[in-house]
Amino acid sequence: MECRTGCGACCIAASISSPIPGMPEGKPAGVRCPHLTEDYRCALYNSPERPAVCSAFKAEPEFCGNNPEEAYRILYELSR
């Protein structure tokens, strides 16, 4: 599955427990990653600073559902 353009659910809904640049305590669920651009792209995508958890996440129907709304719902539920 290809990542949906303009979605960003994994960069907003998911929590990140490890430190990320600009957020040394990690990122709580529901907080927009500071590296998510206005067009919902990762500003760290090709950078060595990109967190391993982000690099390991793959867009899959199980997590992304059929549309961005489903992706947000699924990822919020998983982050609880």
Image (cartoon, rainbow, N blue to C red):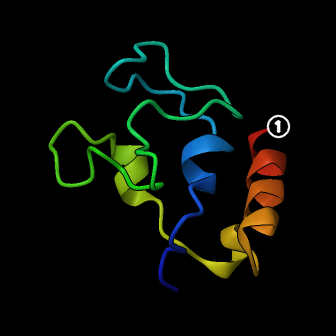
25 or 37, which is in the foreground?
Answer: 37
> Which of the 4 quarters of the picture holds residue 80?
top right
Q: In this view, does 52 lie above or below 23?
A: below
For this orientation, the residue located farthest to the front is 38
Left or right, residue 4 beside residue 24: right
Check the image and report above or below for 63 versus 8. Answer: below
Residue annotated with mark 1: 80
42 lies above or below 27: below
Give the mark count. 1
Instruction: Please identify the quarter of the rendering in which residue 7 is found.
Output: bottom right
Q: What residue type is labelled 1?
A: Arg
Q: Residues within 10 Å of mark 1 (few under 14, many from 20)?
A: few
Q: Return the x and y of residue 30 as percentages of the image width and height.
A: 71, 34
Residue at x 33%, y 40% (from the top left corner)? 51
Find numbered disc 1 in the image and state the secondary structure of the residue it sits on.
loop
The answer to whether 50 is drawn above or below residue 62 in the figure is above
Query: Given the current orientation, which residue lies at the most extreme top position?
Result: 25
